[in-house]
Image (cartoon, rainbow, N blue to C red):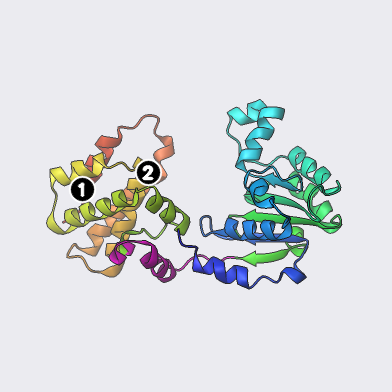
Amino acid sequence: MKNFPWIDEKISSIDLSSLSHALIIEGQEGVGKNKVCQYLINCLLNEKNSNNLIKNNSHPDLFCINNETLISYFQREDKNKLKNNTKKIPVAFIREAIDFTMLKSGLSKNKILFIDGAENLTISSQNALLKTLEEPPQNTYIIIQSNRFKCLNQTIYSRCQLIHFNNILQDDLYSWAEDVLQNKNDKFVIPSYMTPKKVSQLIEDGSFENLRLLSNYLDSLFNKGIDGKVINDIIDLNIEFNEKLNYIIDFTLSISKKGSSNIHPVRLSDFIEELSNFRENLFKINSLNQRYVLNHFLLKIPS
């Protein structure tokens, strides 16, 4: 899959000779921030044969805190939290990471602590990390990746070099999509909430075709009227229920904004509001007949 052009631009703007020993790379999830993190890790641990060690998370001078290592930590230390599927990064795990930074490097000149998903750091974890950021050990780099803007202690930001990713504009996403899709017009199938990473995954595993079919089916229902076969085709599509619901709302919003439909704007707005209210209250529903719900709402598409 072709690299994201905005990632190439971001990488080319990084001056490794003046790199801070602590960095925060933040932005919307799915825009490719981890590609920048991986680039930095590979550059800083650039000895021979390091790439495979880094890829397998077995490099002796790299300490990763991510979903995989967090699960391993809870398996070892607190299986109750593992059962509860917590994503919070506990202070004890951060202390382990800090102890690692105090050790001598084993293979490379540098050591790296990489925290992926720093929005999950607890307040105690952030406070523990702050002490190390204030006095980082020699030849140690701390790379912090966050999927939320300004979610950390302000003092942490003051101790780090910030690499900030703006949200991807729709036009930039479309421009990139034209180069990776077989049919350039399929870029209009991509919903406004979908990230480049997700689009890439759908293309790579062949699931993008399902998205294109969903778009075509909805276009038929909105422009040609209700059709039971088309509704059944949507229900049978191999797309998760929540994803279908999100897509229907986004599709209707797009029609409403463009003003390209013969359907009265008020009726479109009422339909969007009803769907959105249902989505917001989904967590309150104990059991749900997904086929019935989709059929119910698709039959209510205004004409």
Tag 2 secondary structure: helix
Residue 52 at x, y = what percent?
64, 48
Check disc 2 and report the residue beneath it: 242
Quadrant location, the C terminus: bottom left
Nearer to us: label 2 or label 1:
2
Residue 266 at x, y = what percent?
25, 61
Extreme residue in the front direction: 48
Look at the image and tell me whether residue 140 can be seen.
yes
Q: Is 267 placed above or below 92 here?
A: below
Crowdedness near tag 2: few (<14), some (14–19) or many (≥20) residues, C-alpha within 10 Å: few
**Magenta segment boundaries in residue numbering:** 165-187
Query: How many marks can you see?
Result: 2
Q: Residue at x 22, y 40 (%)?
A: 295
Look at the image and tell me whether residue 166 can be seen.
no
Q: Mark 1: which amino acid?
A: Lys
- Secondary structure, magenta segment, majority class: helix
Q: Kindly identify which numbered label has been placed on residue 65.
A: none
Q: Is residue 30 left or right of residue 79?
A: left
Q: Nearer the viewer, residue 254 or 68?
A: 68
